[in-house]
Structure formats: C-alpha cells, structure tokens
Amino acid sequence: MATWSAPGKIFLFGEHAVVYGKPGIAMAIKPRVFVTVRKSRVAHHAKSPYIDSCFDMMGVRGSVYVNSQLASSSGLGSSAAVTVATLSAINDEFGKKHRPEEIADMAFAIEKKVQKGRASPTDTTVSTFGGLVLITGTKRRRLPPQNFQLVVGNSLVQHNTARMVEQVASFRQKSPDICNPIIEAIGAISLSAMRHLNDANKLGEYMNMNHALLDALGVGHPQLSRLVLASRAAGAYGAKLTGAGGGGCMIAICPKHLKSRVAGAIEACDARAFSTSIDTEGVRKEKDA
Ligand code: PMV
C-alpha cells in the first residue's frame, strides 16, 4: 500500500492564454489531495477518467482510495492533483522508479487526453513540484517563493474545464481578430506581473485587468464578478477569477490586516472563502494509514 499527496493550485495570471503558448503564473496552495494505491489482481474502475488513465498508462491493476481537501471542478486543480498523486502512488507501490519530471509529463499527457487535446502543463507541473511557477508553452521556470496574502472565494457554481477551454477555442476560430489580441494581452500581463512579484498593490492592478480580459474571453460568471467586486470593495488590492472560469473560484490579493474582512465580504455573497498561502512542496509520500 502506498499513500501520496499532491497540492492544489491557483492561477495568479494567464489561465486560458497558457493553452495558446502564452506565459502564465501559477502557485501551489496548501489544500492537498491524498491518494492510496494498493496492488490488486482485479481491475477497479475508479469512475474517474483521470485515475483509470493513470493505471492504464502505468500498465498495472490496483485499488485506489482518494481523500481530497480540494473542492472538485472549482478551478483549484483537483484533477491534476489526483492524477499526480495517483501516478506517484502507483510508481511507489509497483516499484516503477519514474522520476518526478516523468510523473509530471505523464500527468500532463493524461490531462490533455481527458481535456480532448487542449491543456497546458500548468496544473500538473505545479502539483508535481510545488512553489511558484512561470509556464510558457511546455517550458516551466520556478520563480522565487512569495508570501502573498491571498483569499480564495469559491462561487459554489460548478464548472467544466474542458467545456470552457473548448468555448475559448471556438471563439478564437470564429473571431480570431478579436480573440487573439485578448490572449496576447493576458500573456503580457503575466510577464509584467513577473517583474513586480514583491509589489502587492501592482499585482492587484494586474489581477483586475486580467479578470476583465477573462470576462472578454467569455469565461466569466455573474457570481464570480460579484465576489471580485465585493473583495475589492472590502479593501483587496485586486481580484480575479482563477482557473477555467464559468464558475469555480476567484482569488483576491489583500493587505494582511484586511484578509478576514475580504473573506467576510465574499461569504456575504453566498460563497465560501478561505485564506491561503504558497505550498513550496510538491507531490510527497505520506505515512500509510
Ligand atoms: O480550472 P482549472 O483548474 O482546471 O484550470 C484550467 C486552466 C486553463 O488554462 C483554462 C486550462 C489549462 O489546461 O491550463
């Protein structure tokens, strides 16, 4: 029996644009997914295309138990965390000896397949290695960890990443002259933000711009915008949706002393809020229960 855990993630900047090779910045956060794998002669179907694909890719059969601290389908990268933790637990339980880089690549291939060919390696990279990461195409660069004061708001509106990614793809196909400049501008924001990582005020401004551009891409949701506006009114430097959009979560960057006020403002809009910080550790082995 082997138990491994992997962290969730938030996109600080650049979701959707990363699917088209533009830069994005993502960060591993504290809630984790725990996966236990045990050898078994019988194939157990996990009802999750991600988990089934992990067993298929590793060419083994086993049973699996998932314990997640992350809300699923909310933009916090739970599917990537499940995939990375499952692959790592299989790797350990069956003595496969794959390196973390290989685990990240396999997890990306699985996400891409389940998301019908359109995915960036962001979630799987962050979940495997932890920390703060700049993603450009298939290149990943670790950035120095930052102590951002962040509040996550979950709109409690479920979304479907594959559907949102497809929606942007069809907008891009129908109106490339409008869609491509939006994607370019989002990429430019990620690059500018990278030069101001220690200036929370400036990052807040960039988050506000990024949120407006995501709305323009068509991946906003009235409830997400409500939470974003409530956070700003409560004193956040800035706020934006995080992940695929159409529901799911938003993030707000705040002065430390206003974090609980911002969280309260989000909860007053019939949503859930929690404050979070960076998890510098990626996938790791846990003690077997
Ligand atoms: O909602 P999430 O956590 O699955 O994030 C999706 C982010 C996208 O950029 C829209 C897709 C991707 O694969 O990067």
Image (cartoon, helix red, strand yellow):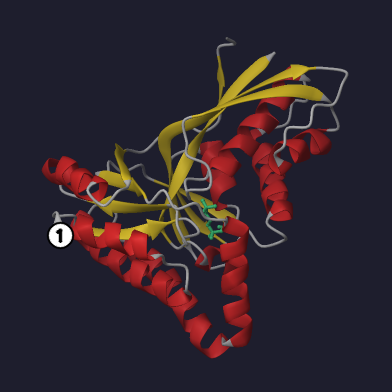
The one of 259 and 19 positioned closer to us in this rendering: 259
Q: Which amino acid, mark 1?
A: Ala
Q: In this view, does 270 lie to the left or right of 109?
A: left
Q: State the count of labels.
A: 1
Indicate the quadrant where residue 120 lies. Answer: bottom right
Please say whether residue 244 is visible from this viewpoint. yes
Please say whether residue 196 is visible from this viewpoint. no
Image location of residue 268, percent across then percent down: 22, 48
Position above or below: 49 against 14: above
Q: In this view, does 86 lie to the left or right of 279?
A: right
Instruction: Indicate the quadrant containing the C terminus: top left, top right, bottom left or bottom right.
Output: top right
Image location of residue 183, percent across then percent down: 49, 75
Image location of residue 154, percent across then percent down: 37, 47
Q: In this view, does 49 lie to the left or right of 122?
A: right
Looking at the rendering, the quadrant in which ligand 1 lies is: bottom right
What residue does disc 1 label?
233
Image location of residue 22, percent across then percent down: 52, 68
Indicate the quadrant where residue 258 lies. Answer: top left
Label 1 environment density (alpha carbons within 10 Å; few <14, some 14–19, many ≥20): few
Residue at image coords 85%, 26%: 43
Instruction: Indicate the quadrant containing the N terminus: top left, top right, bottom left or bottom right.
Output: top right
Question: Outermost residue toward the front?
Answer: 270
